[in-house]
Amino acid sequence: MELPLFSLNTVLFPGGVLPLRIFETRYIDMVRRCLREDGGFGVCLIREGAEVGAPAAVYEIATEAHIVDWEQRSDGLLGIVAEGRRKLRVLRTWAMPDRLLMGEVEPLPEEPRVLLPVEFESLGQLLQRILGEIGPPYSNLRMQLDDASWVGSRLTELLPLEHADKQRLLELDDPLARLFHLRDAMVQINLR
C-alpha cells in the first residue's frame, strides 16, 4: 500500500489526535487529496532532516492518520486535526516532484486489549488530570482509562519525553511493557 508521509518532530499513536497547521504547498495538496478521497497519510518521526524543506529521513514504524476536522485559520493557514488509526511499517520511501514524501507501507497488527492493571491506576489518574487541563482536541477524546494501551499511548504522546524515547514506545507491541517504561521515565522527570 502507498501513502503520503508527513514527517514531523512528533509521535502519534493509534487513537490519538494531532492538531497541525499546514502551510507548505506539498502538504496543502496532500490534505486536499486526503479529504477528496477520504484517504489517510502516515505520521512519521524524523530520523534525520527537518520538518520544512527537503524530504526528511523517517523512522520505520509510523501511524496512519485520517483528517477528522479542518478549518481556515485566522492567520490564513489551514488547520487540521488528524486522528491516529493504526501502526504502519514503512518499507521504502521516495520523494515526489513537489517534495512530498511517499512510502510503501504495511499495516501492523493491533495491540491486544489489556485492562489497566491496578499497579498502573495512578497513570490513568494522571492522564485524566492532564486531559482535563489541556482542552480540545485532546479533551474531546473518548476516555478509555481502563485500557492499558490507550493510557500508555496517550501519556507517551503528552508527556515531555525525548522524541526518540516516544518512538521506542511506539515500536513496542506490548501495552504493559510500555507502561513499565513510562513509569520509569516519570520517576526520572519527577512526575510521580
Image (cartoon, rainbow, N blue to C red):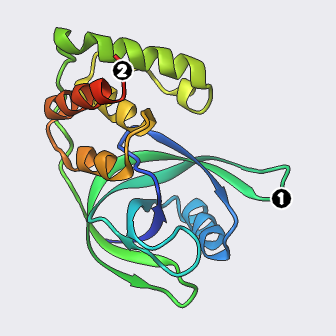
What amino acid is found at the position of numbered circle 2 in the picture? Gln
**Foreground: 147 or 180?**
180
The front one of 127 and 184 is 184
- Disc with the residue nearer the chain's start (2 vs 1): 1
x, y percentage for residue 95? 45, 85
Q: Secondary structure at mark 1?
A: loop
Q: Is residue 120 above or below residue 152?
A: above
Q: Is residue 99 left or right of residue 76?
A: left
Count of marks placed on residues = 2
Q: Is residue 139 above or below residue 29?
A: above
Amino acid type at image mark 1: Gly
Residue under the point 36% across and 20% down: 144
Whether residue 144 is situated above or below residue 58 in the rendered picture: above
Q: Which residue is mark 2?
A: 144
Residue lying at 38% horizontally and 11% vertically, measured from the top left: 125
- Disc 1: CA contacts within 10 A as few (<14), some (14-19) or many (>=20): few
Q: Is 29 on the left-hand or right-hand side of 47?
A: right
At horizontal 28% and vertical 24% (from top left) the residue drawn is 187
Q: Classify mark 2: residues with Cα within 10 Å, few (<14), some (14-19) or many (20+).
A: some
Q: Position of residue 126 (x, y in %)?
A: 40, 16
Q: What is the quadrant of the N terminus in the image?
A: bottom left
Relative to residue 84, is residue 53 drawn left or right? Answer: right
Q: Which residue is disc 1 drawn over? A: 76
Percent coordinates x, y for residue 158 in the rendering: 45, 34
